[in-house]
Image: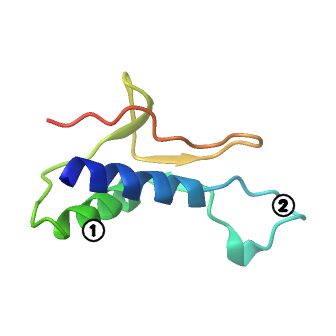
Amino acid sequence: QAKADISSAIDLYFSQVVMFISGLDFVDDKNDVLTIASIGGVVDDALQATGGTITSVAFGRDATVSDLRYTLLPGQLVNSGPLLYA
């Protein structure tokens, strides 16, 4: 159940992260940056419902790249891809 909760929470979070277009979008609505802290918070919140805890979270554009912060480029979308658990 914890994995399903994490997957749902990550999918919801990523659906809310969108590229920012200066001049078209309102600055107050800007939400185009992914950070390890925000993703870790999403995972931690999802696990609290089942009483679970995390020790670390990593994310990257692919399995070989780990990012601390990533800003979406014009035209770029986010999808969660495969989630790995250890």
Is 67 left, or right, of 53 in this rendering?
A: right
- Foreground mark, 2 or 1, reads 1
Q: Decide which of tag 2 and tag 1 comes sooner along the chain.
A: 2
In this view, the residue in front, 10 or 34, is 10
Picture quadrant of residue 46: bottom left
- Assign a secondary structure to mark 1: helix
Q: For marks 2 and 1, give the CA distance.
A: 32 Å
Picture quadrant of residue 50: bottom left
Picture quadrant of residue 31: bottom right
Label 2 neighbourhood size at 10 Å, few (<14), some (14-19), many (20+)? few
What amino acid is found at the position of numbered circle 2 in the picture? Answer: Ser
Residue lying at 28% horizontally and 50% vertically, measured from the top left: 4
Q: Position of residue 67 (x, y in %)?
A: 41, 39
In this view, the residue in front, 79 or 61, is 79
Residue denoted by label 2: 22
Is 24 left, or right, of 57 in this rendering?
A: right
Q: Residue furthest bottom?
A: 28
What amino acid is found at the position of numbered circle 1 in the picture? Answer: Asp
Disc sitting over residue 58 in the figure: none
Q: Where is residue 28 in the image (x, y as percent from the top left)?
A: 70, 78
Residue lying at 52% horizontally and 53% vertically, measured from the top left: 14
Residue lying at 66% horizontally and 55% vertically, measured from the top left: 18
Q: Where is residue 33 in the image (x, y as percent from the top left)?
A: 56, 55
Is 55 left, or right, of 65 in this rendering?
A: left
Residue denoted by label 1: 45
